[in-house]
Amino acid sequence: MIDAIIIDRNAIPMLGKSVNNTLMLSLIKHNVKEVYLALDADATKDIYKIAKKLISNSVNVRAVILPKNQDPATIGQSEFFNCMNNSILLDKCNLLKFKMKS
């Protein structure tokens, strides 16, 4: 929850490493075009699962890679936005490459 406050931009705290069905359906129903996924560094493999679902529903997904053992609350807003600017666009072609790296 604190991470969402630090980000201060239309952020939705996931309260775990997965997107619940209600949120997933809401993103799809409201035709959300792009989602930035920012999970702790130890959860990058979970980004793959979430991204795969969203991509299959025509949502552009960007993976925000955070420094090891850090989260938005510890790195602060400006450093988080630097990570966001360097996010990786995941699509069908490079999603598998991302999974292999994590």
Image (tube, rainbow, N blue to C red):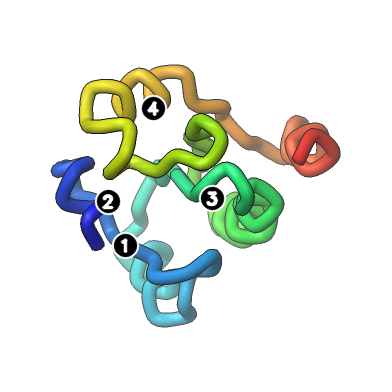
Q: Which residue is mark 3?
A: 58
Instruction: Tell me residue 49's x, y (percent).
Output: 67, 59
Label 1 crowd (10 A; few <14 / some 14-19 / many >=20): few
Instruction: Tell me residue 37's x, y (percent).
Output: 46, 46
Q: Secondary structure at mark 1?
A: loop
Query: What distance separates the C-alpha of mark 2 from that of mark 4?
Result: 14 Å
Asked whether the residues under the numbered discs 1 and 2 touch, taking CB atoms below 8 Å apart as contact, a structural biologist would say yes
Q: Residue furthest right?
A: 100
Say whether disc 1 or disc 4 marks the residue closer to the N-terminus.
1
Query: What distance separates the C-alpha of mark 4 from that of mark 3?
Result: 21 Å
Q: Which residue is mark 4?
A: 84
> Which numbered marker is on residue 13?
1
Query: What distance separates the C-alpha of mark 3 from that of mark 2?
Result: 27 Å
Asked whether the residues under the numbered discs 3 and 1 touch, taking CB atoms below 8 Å apart as contact, a structural biologist would say no
Q: Which residue is mark 2?
A: 3
Whether residue 83 is situated above or below residue 32 in the rendered picture: above
Of badges 3 and 2, the one in the foreground is 2
Say whether disc 2 or disc 4 marks the residue closer to the N-terminus.
2
Please name the amino acid that badge 1 sits on.
Pro
Label 3 crowd (10 A; few <14 / some 14-19 / many >=20): some
Instruction: Tell me residue 99's x, y (percent).
Output: 78, 43
Asked whether the residues under the numbered discs 4 and 3 touch, taking CB atoms below 8 Å apart as contact, a structural biologist would say no
Please name the amino acid that badge 4 sits on.
Met
Q: Secondary structure at mark 3?
A: loop
Q: Look at 49% across and 34% down and name the residue there.
A: 66
